Amino acid sequence: MFEDRDTYVIGVDFGTLSGRAVVVRVRDGAELAGAVSPYAHAVVERTLPATGEQLPPDWALQMPGDWVEVLRTAVPAALAASGVAPEDVIAIGTDFTACTVLPTTTDGTPLSDLPELRDRPHAYPKLWKHHAAQPHADRINALAEESGESWLARYGGRISSEWEFAKALQVLEEDPEVYAATERWVEAADWIIWQLCGVYVRNACTAGYKGIYQDGHYPSREYLAALNPGFADFVADKLEHPIGQLGDRAGGLTAQAAAWTGLPEGITVAVGNVDAHVTAPAAQATEPGQLLAVMGTSTCHVMPSDALADVPGMCGVVEGGIVPGLYGYEAGQSAVGDIFGWFVEFGVPAAYRDAAAAQGIGLHEHLTELAAAQEVGEHGLVALDWQGGNRSVLVDAELSGVIVGQTLATRPEDTYRALLESTAFGTRTIIEAFEGSGVPVTEFVVAGGLLKNAFLMQVYADVCRRPLSVIDSQQGPALGSAIYAAVAAGAYPDVTTAARAMGKVRRGVYVPDEQRADAYDALYAEYRQLHDHFGRGGNDVLHRLRAIRRAAVARAGHPGAADAYDVETTSSALPEEQPA
C-alpha cells in the first residue's frame, strides 16, 4: 500500500468566509501544517461590489476569484509550513459549502466575470444561505406533490430554497437574459475541481442531495415544463453532465493550477465533495448508524445507513452520498453558531462586554460561564432555533426565531442559554425523526468549530440523552478531503479503510447526566409544542410577519434595508468552519 518514503495529500476546505488548506501524511493522517485564506469579499449580502447596487432581502452571493485566491495563497503557505517536498504530494482533494451554485459558459467562465454581465446580480454565485428562491421552492414542492413525483419522498417531502433547481428557476424568472446566457449551472464544489484539473465532472454528493438526482434520473422534462415552459430543458441544456463517485479521480493537476499551488503538475485531483459529508471519514463516522453533526454557523447532520427509508424533513437520502455502498442521509439546521453570534452582536449590553474584557475573555465565553452556573430551566425560557429558517424537519426558510417566557427579570445569560438549548432541541428533533422512520442512530459524533464550547457539548449530550464522541481534529472537512484524495490516488482501496487509518475521533467524551436529562425532557416537551404550533400550520404568524416585512421594505423603496437586521457572523466571533 505504501512506498518506502512517506507520501502526502492536500485537503482544501472552502467555507463560508474563508478557505483553508491542510497537508496530511497518508499513512496515518497526521496533519503537518495548515493555512487559511479569508475571502476578500466574504459574503455579498447588501450591495453588489461591481456597482454598489443594493440587494433584496435573503440574498447571499460570492465572488469566484476569492476561491481561486485560496489555491494561490493557502495551499503554498501550508506546503511551505509543513516542510514537505512538493514531489512527495500525490493528490489534492477539496470540499465546498453546498448548495453554492453558479452560472458559467461552456468553458467554465463564471458569468459574473463577463464585462457585460458584471452588473447583473443573478450572474454571480449564489451561496448556500441565499434564501430568496423560497417562492420558487414552494412551487417546486406543490407541483411535485400534486403530480406524485416519486423523488419527493427521498427529500423528506420538500425541496429547499437553497438547492439547485429553486435557485435556477429564480434566475429564469427574474433575469431571463442571464438564464439564457447560462451554458452550465455548476456547483462550486465541481467548479473548483474544474479549475484544478481542467475537467468538469459533477460529484455524486451534490448531484444527489442538491440536484434531485435519484436512481439515475433528474426530474422529467414534463415536470419542469409545468413549472415554467422556459424551464423544460434546464436539465438537458444546463445541468446534466457525467457524475463522478466520491473517492474517484477527476483528473490530473493542470500546469496553471500547479503554478497556483506549487504542487507537481499531473498529480491526482479527487472528485469534489461537500464540507459536512467529507468530514465523516475524518471523524471515523462511516459505519451504518453513526450520525455526524458538523457544527459551525449552521449544522449539517450526515449519517450512513444500510436501510432505505423515507424520513420526513430530511435534506435527502442518496445511495453512495457519503461512502460508497451505503445510503447517505442528510439533515440540518440552517443557523446555529449564527444564532449565538447574532445575539452576542445585538442582544448584550455594554456592561457585559466590559466584564468580559476585564477577565481577558471573549463575550461568548463570558456568557457561557454565566449560563453554565444555572440549573436546567432556571431561566424560565424556551426558544425555537429558527432565526435562519428551519432546514429539518420542517424545511421552511420562511420561519423565524421565537423566545417564550421572558420577563423583566430575564438577563442576557438567560436568553443565551435558551438559544444554546434550542439548537440542541432541534438536533434531538432530527434524531427522533430518523429513529421514528426506522433508521437507527447508533452513535452521535460531533465535529466543527463549536466543539470548543464544552458546556454546549454537554447540553447536547443531556438533551439528546446520548454520549457524544468528538472528532480529534480542528480541520475536519480539510482532513476529510485529504482522505478522499488518498483514496483517489490509490493509497487505500476504499474510504472506510482510509478513515480507519487517517481519521481521528475520541469516543464518548461527553456523557449525559440523568438528572439534567430528565429536566430537559420537560423543556423539550414545550419546545415540541411550540415547534408544531408555529411550524406545522397551527399558527401562521411567522409567515405573515415575513410578508409584512417585505411589503414594508418595498414601500420604503430600499430593497437592501432589511439586511440591516441580518448578521454575517465573522471569524472573530465564531470559529469559521461552516457546514451547509
Image (cartoon, helix red, strand yellow):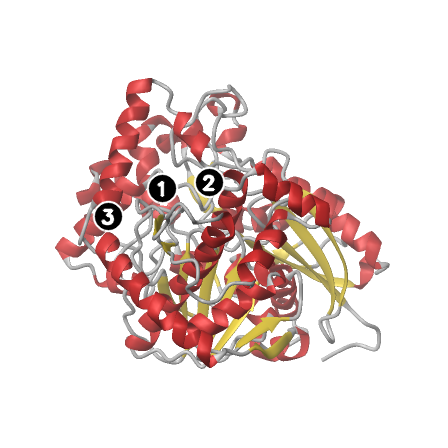
Q: Left or right? Give the position of 575 relative to 289.
A: right
Q: Amino acid at mark 1?
A: Lys
Q: Upstream in the sequence, badge 1 or badge 2? A: 2
Q: Is residue 312 above or below residue 570?
A: below
Q: Is residue 304 visible?
A: no
Residue at label 1? 167
Instruction: Say which element carries label 3.
Output: helix
Residue drawn at x 53%, y 58% as measured from the top left: 371
Residue drawn at x 14%, y 55% as measured from the top left: 147
Crowd around label 1: few <14 · some 14–19 · many ≥20 (10 Å): many
Q: Is residue 69 visible?
A: yes
Crowd around label 3: few <14 · some 14–19 · many ≥20 (10 Å): many
Instruction: Say which element carries label 1.
Output: helix
Q: Amino acid at mark 2?
A: Leu
Residue 517, given in percent of the width and then of the height, sits at 43, 75
Instruction: Say which element carries label 2.
Output: strand
The span from disc 1 to disc 2 (Cα, nearest Å) is 10 Å
